[in-house]
Image (cartoon, helix red, strand yellow):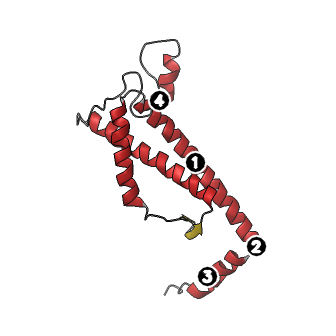
């Protein structure tokens, strides 16, 4: 017979960790690091979004913002200031909320662009959207005319 998991004892330990100021400082550092990671990832994604959008006209920006609005409706209840990290919901201050919103916006723009790219690759035409001729549609890396640097670009692609 497996020993029953001492749920209560475990919970008591968790709660005392939550209340321990040393633990909470550590958690705050992890939370900040996590936030920064998300921001960096969103920044890379936005660079990709820009690379794909620069090959398209303004009508595609409109399509992207319509898709972003739908994605926002599907993912976040309106006016939610919470941020869940390691199973705990945190209230965010104004500055943190702005950062979270900016991360979400960049991520949603990226998802929308990825959808348009995926459709275009399947020959499904959405509006005037077209794949860039001079960049890789999967990652936004410039490709094209053979130059001295072309080899390095290809290598990066793997
Ligand atoms: Zn690529």
Disc 4 packing (10 Å; few <14; some 14–19; many ≥20)? few
Disc 2 packing (10 Å; few <14; some 14–19; many ≥20)? few
Q: Secondary structure at mark 3?
A: helix
Q: Which residue is mark 1?
A: 39
Tell me the CA gap for discs 1 and 4: 23 Å
Label 4 beta carbon within 8 A of ligand 1: yes
Tell me the CA gap for discs 4 and 3: 47 Å
Specify which label sits upstream in the sequence, 1 or 3.
3
Residue 151 position, x and y percent, is: 50, 18
Q: Which residue is mark 2?
A: 21
Q: Which residue is mark 3?
A: 10
Residue 37 position, x and y percent, is: 60, 49
Specify which label sits upstream in the sequence, 4 or 2.
2
Contact (CB < 8 A) between labels 1 and 4? Answer: no
Contact (CB < 8 A) between labels 3 and 2? Answer: no
Picture quadrant where residue 7 is located: bottom right
């Amino acid at each position: 017979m497996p020993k029953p998991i001492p749920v209560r004892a475990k919970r008591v330990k968790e709660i005392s960790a939550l209340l321990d100021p040393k633990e909470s400082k550590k958690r705050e550092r992890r939370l900040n690091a996590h936030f920064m990671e998300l921001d960096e990832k969103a920044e890379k994604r936005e660079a990709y979004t820009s690379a794909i959008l620069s090959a398209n006209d303004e009508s595609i920006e409109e399509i992207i913002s319509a898709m972003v609005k739908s994605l926002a409706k599907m993912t976040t209840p309106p006016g939610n200031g919470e941020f869940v990290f390691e199973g705990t919901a945190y209230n965010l201050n104004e500055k943190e909320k702005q950062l979270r919103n900016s991360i979400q916006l960049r991520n949603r723009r990226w998802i929308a662009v990825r959808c348009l790219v995926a459709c275009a690759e399947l020959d499904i035409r959405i509006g005037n959207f077209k794949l860039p001729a001079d960049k890789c549609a999967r990652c936004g890396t410039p490709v094209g005319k053979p130059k001295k640097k072309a080899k390095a670009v290809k290598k990066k692609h793997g």
